[in-house]
Image: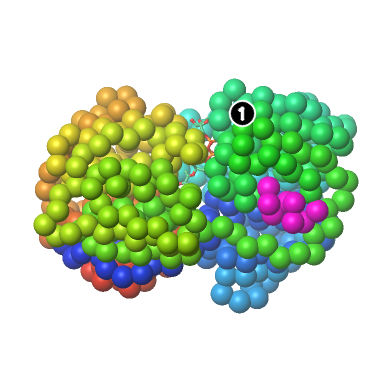
């Protein structure tokens, strides 16, 4: 049984929040570490449920992992001898599918139980498969939910992604670092965590160029010596969630340990809405005076450097506190508005039609709501912090999958939130 959060709304959040390491980088980097030929040290790893599950899967497969201190692990894949990952844990998280690329590169074959993750409608992996097939992983079977891919010879090739996909870009990169010759991924995703995984691989001896642009060129190496340390970048989405909470509660929060450049799509919108946004070298302060009102604006989610879909539920929630009519277009996922009925039960005036949500500013009141997925859960907590009275958020396991020390960080900026088992 998952815990609940009980939130008393109406307190402006004030203070400093230190941003943790990026969840989506960490998932790619841990899988990449499985493909290495030597040990490595990974720093700034967020202690969250998704990462714990992926580390458990790696240990089940033979990796030796030790927590050195707070957020640092040593990771040794020397005893990983199997290409088959089919334990129940594999199906618990989406990120386990990066083992497809990592093992195809390492062993030239892989069998994996199909991955789980948040439900936003269909989540196909056809682009990943298309990439593996271009590299020679043509022998593909799917039986009882287990996908098996084998390559006689893994050889670099040109791959064009007909849709921008974070997962496909990382997975193909993971296979290509050990393929013979040169792989070029065209129309690659450019998210900060793509660059982070590429930087990790390069630190460990790979040759990946162009990550962060839409053409990534990978020259395969038969052996990745590793024996180095790498520090994961700060989590863009965690930072964005606290920035939105600051504006939503008429508070004043400085998020530290982030990369301001990664926050630009959100910072620009918060400024357009009338919030104060002050950038430091590695921090951002967001504030809104008690007497000020946010202005409604329009958002459209897009691959990076567009507005991130993973901040869509939180930004839609923010629009409920703005003056006027705001719009949110979700253009990445087919069905990511399912949480809106929870917001409506708190008094939000939102009408959806396909990928469009039209939000009319209104006063929210506390009630009991269900966190159906990670970011939707964070959005409901955001709503509860502003709502009149008490909000109970259930199924908070979904939130803790992706936010490190969520409740403690919120309490440190004066949020009235308690965990109830
Ligand atoms: N798509 C296809 N075919 C594919 C792959 C993707 O059609 O083979 C479509 C998807 O259905 C979707 C779009 O392409 O409509 C983008 O999907 P993408 O592959 O980029 O998403 P993902 O890699 O499965 C990652 C993050 C998500 C985040 C998306 C988009 C991880 C583990 N997950 O998912 O993060 O929403 O990129 O930025 O990195 C989260 O952290 O809450 C989260 C859901």
The quadrant of the rendering that contains the C terminus is bottom left
Residue 252 or residue 374, whichever sits in front = 252
The picture places residue 155, in percent across and down from the top left corner, at 84, 32
Relative to residue 82, is residue 210 drawn left or right?
left
Residue 316 placement (x, y as % from top left): 28, 41
218 with respect to 145 (left or right): right
Q: Position of residue 400 (x, y in %)?
A: 43, 59
Which residue sits furthest bottom? 69
Q: Is residue 285 magenta?
A: no
Residue at 23% of width from left, 69% of height from top? 416
What residue is rendered at 65% in x and 53% in y?
29
Secondary structure that dominates the magenta span: helix
Q: Which residues are magenta?
A: 198-205
Rendered location of residue 354, percent (x, y): 32, 24
Q: Quadrant of the N terminus?
A: bottom left
Q: Residue shown at 65%/44% (left/top)?
A: 98
Q: Check the image and report above or below for 162 versus 262.
A: above
Q: Is residue 81 visible?
A: no
Asked where in the image residue 11 lies, by quadrant, the reply is bottom left
Q: Is mark 1 within 8 Å of ligand 1?
A: no
Horizontal side of 83 relative to 389 (left or right) equals right
Q: Residue 179's quadrant in the figure?
A: top right
Residue at horizontal 41%, vertical 29%? 331
Can residue 347 be seen by looking at this rendering?
Answer: yes
Task: Identify residue for label 1.
Answer: 187
């Amino acid at each position: 049984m998952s815990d609940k959060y009980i939130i008393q709304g109406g307190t402006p959040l004030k203070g400093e929040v230190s941003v943790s390491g990026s969840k989506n980088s960490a998932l790619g980097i841990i899988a990449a570490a499985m493909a290495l030929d030597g040990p490595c040290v990974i720093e700034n790893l967020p202690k969250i449920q998704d990462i714990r599950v992926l580390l458990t899967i790696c240990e089940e497969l033979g990796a030796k992992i030790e927590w050195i201190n707070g957020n640092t692990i040593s990771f040794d894949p020397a005893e990983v001898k199997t290409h088959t990952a089919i334990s129940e844990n594999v199906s618990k998280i989406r990120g386990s599918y990066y083992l497809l690329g990592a093992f195809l590169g390492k062993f030239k074959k892989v069998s994996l139980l199909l991955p789980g993750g948040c439900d936003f409608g269909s989540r196909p992996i056809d682009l990943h498969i298309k990439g593996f097939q271009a590299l020679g992983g043509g022998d593909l079977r799917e039986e009882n939910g287990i996908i098996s891919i084998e390559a006689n010879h893994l050889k670099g090739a040109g791959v064009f992604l007909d849709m921008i996909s974070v997962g496909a870009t990382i997975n193909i990169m993971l296979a290509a670092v050990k393929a013979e010759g040169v792989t070029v991924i065209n129309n690659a995703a450019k998210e900060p965590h793509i660059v982070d995984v590429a930087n990790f691989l390069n630190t460990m001896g790979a040759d990946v160029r162009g990550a962060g642009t839409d053409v990534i060129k990978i020259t395969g190496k038969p052996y990745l010596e590793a024996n180095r340390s790498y520090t994961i970048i700060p989590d863009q989405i965690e930072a964005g969630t606290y920035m939105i909470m600051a504006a939503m509660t008429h508070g004043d929060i400085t998020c530290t340990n982030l990369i301001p450049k990664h926050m630009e799509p959100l910072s620009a919108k918060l400024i357009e809405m009338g919030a104060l946004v002050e950038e430091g070298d590695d921090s951002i302060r967001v504030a809104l005076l008690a007497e000020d009102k946010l202005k409604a604006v329009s958002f459209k989610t897009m691959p990076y450097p567009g507005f991130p879909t993973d901040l869509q539920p939180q930004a839609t929630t923010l629009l409920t506190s703005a003056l006027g009519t705001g719009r949110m277009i979700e253009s990445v996922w087919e069905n990511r508005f399912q949480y809106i009925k929870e917001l409506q039960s708190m008094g939000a005036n939102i009408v959806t039609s396909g990928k469009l949500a039209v939000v009319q500013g209104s006063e929210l009141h506390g009630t009991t709501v269900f966190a159906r997925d990670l970011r939707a859960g964070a959005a409901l907590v955001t709503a509860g912090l502003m709502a009149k009275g008490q909000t109970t958020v259930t199924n908070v396991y979904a939130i803790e999958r992706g936010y490190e020390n969520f409740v403690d960080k919120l309490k440190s900026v004066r949020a009235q939130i308690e965990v109830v088992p």
